[in-house]
């Protein structure tokens, strides 16, 4: 069976939009822990639109927050961009059930958490390879390469080998394609070796032959369009709600983080080798309306036992998840690239913290 997973760089226009939205969330939360934020960003060329709802004692300087993201990701327009904002306060109808006294979910919907034993990160191997390829690209500091990039890995699960490795990376106009190919192919083979994989995979690097125009000048960026790259590369289901631009009272974000943490804990407790956890919420209601577990026939105990185990060990109210994971004190700007389930400094990824209440 062939399965393909993709990752994108922080200079991809959708990720620029995510980082701007999360920079606004983090700025509000760092100045007022009770902030309610739901913002979206659109970027095309040097035109940026930020819209949404913010209820906070703090008024963010959106112009400066945008500038800081662009300085790293689209430096050519750091001091030459057009910003339009459309910001209002959170609806009072939503606030009726989501204020701190009631503590209900900030929206209805389902979220999924996933973990597997394929890699030490408890993530699917092709997704890890694609993501680490982007990470390596961003760390090369080559003067030939620019900030927009995508990596894709196709893995043959029947033969347990890499079938195809693809990298598309923006480069300077005067860059020699052979030099770009050398950088990328080195990364591919280095990662394949690190994970004990075959070296005879098909290699694709900038398949059109040229990738000079990129970032917001090559595409339009919108918050929340890379939710598969943000999670599990398509290996697990997704509730559909984006993470970026939302404060942690929104279960699209906090619930998904908690579901991932629970999935990892199930593996750590040796209850299964692969698991998907679904949590479903109703707006204004604190407790989840349902908990569903799928172990893909790898469970050491019945799924019904794991559901009871989850209910026993975790407070799944928005307030409980926020407290357990410390979600009021996370700089979300740094979660919005290379996936939200990746680095140990993220409290939902920290394997050293004991699970449960």
Image (spheres, rainbow, N blue to C red):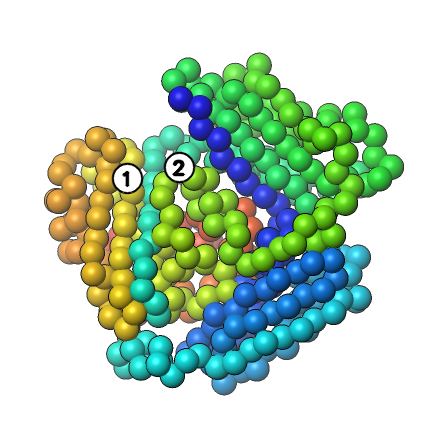
Q: If you read the primary sequence from the N terminus, does the residue marked by circle 2 or circle 1 appear first?
A: 2
Q: Can the viewer see residue 142?
A: no
Q: CA distance from mark 2 to mark 1?
A: 11 Å
What residue is drawn where x is 46% and y is 66%?
246
What residue is drawn where x is 48% and y is 70%?
38
* Mark 2, secondary structure of its residue: loop
The C terminus - image quarter:
bottom left
Q: Which mark is residue 76?
A: none
Q: Residue furthest right?
A: 174
Q: Quadrant of residue 150?
A: top right
Number of other residues with Cα within 10 Å of mark 1, as a class: few under 14, some 14 to 19, many 20 or more? many
Q: Which mark is residue 275?
A: 1
Disc 2 versus disc 1: nearer the observer = 2
What residue is drawn where x is 42% and y is 15%?
159
Q: Depth check: give the residue in front, 153 or 1.
A: 1
Q: Position of residue 74 (x, y in %)?
A: 73, 56
* Mark 1, secondary structure of its residue: strand
Q: Position of residue 42 (x, y in %)?
A: 62, 62
Residue 65 horizontal side relative to residue 24, left or right? right
Q: Position of residue 186 (x, y in %)?
A: 66, 25
Q: Which residue is mark 2?
A: 235
Number of other residues with Cα within 10 Å of mark 2, as a class: few under 14, some 14 to 19, many 20 or more? some
Q: Can the viewer see residue 41?
A: yes
Q: Quadrant of residue 333?
A: bottom right
- As displayed, is residue 81 above or below residue 216? below
């Amino acid at each position: 069976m062939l399965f393909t997973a993709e990752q994108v760089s922080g200079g991809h226009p959708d990720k620029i939009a995510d980082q701007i939205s999360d920079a606004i969330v983090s700025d509000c939360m760092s100045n007022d822990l009770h902030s309610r934020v739901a913002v979206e960003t659109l970027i095309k060329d040097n035109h940026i639109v930020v819209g949404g709802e913010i209820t906070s004692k703090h008024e963010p300087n959106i112009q400066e927050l945008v500038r800081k993201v662009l300085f790293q990701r689209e430096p050519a327009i750091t001091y030459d961009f057009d910003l339009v904002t459309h910001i209002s306060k959170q609806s009072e109808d939503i606030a009726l059930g989501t204020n701190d006294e009631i503590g209900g979910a900030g929206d209805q919907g389902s979220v999924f958490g996933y973990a597997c034993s394929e890699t030490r990160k408890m993530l699917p191997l092709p997704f890890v390879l694609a993501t680490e390829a982007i990470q390596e690209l961003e760390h090369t500091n080559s003067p030939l390469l620019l900030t927009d990039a995508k990596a894709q890995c196709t893995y043959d699960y029947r033969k347990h080998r890499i079938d195809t490795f693809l990298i598309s990376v923006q480069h300077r106009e005067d860059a020699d394609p052979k030099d770009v190919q050398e950088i990328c192919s080195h990364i591919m083979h280095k990662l394949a070796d690190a994970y004990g994989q075959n070296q005879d995979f098909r290699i694709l690097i900038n398949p059109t032959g040229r990738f000079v125009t990129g970032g917001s000048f090559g595409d339009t960026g919108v918050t929340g369009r890379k939710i598969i790259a943000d999670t599990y590369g398509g290996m697990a289901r997704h509730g559909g709600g984006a993470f970026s631009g939302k404060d942690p009272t929104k279960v699209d974000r906090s619930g998904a983080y908690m579901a991932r943490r629970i999935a990892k804990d199930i593996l750590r407790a040796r209850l299964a080798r692969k698991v998907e956890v679904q949590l479903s919420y109703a707006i204004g209601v604190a407790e989840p309306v349902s908990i569903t577990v799928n172990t893909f026939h790898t469970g050491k105990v019945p799924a019904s036992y794991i559901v009871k185990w989850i209910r026993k060990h975790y407070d799944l109210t928005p307030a409980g998840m926020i407290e357990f994971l410390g979600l009021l004190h996370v700089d979300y700007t740094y979660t919005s690239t290379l996936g939200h389930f990746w680095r140990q400094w993220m409290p939902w990824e920290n394997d050293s913290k004991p699970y449960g209440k």
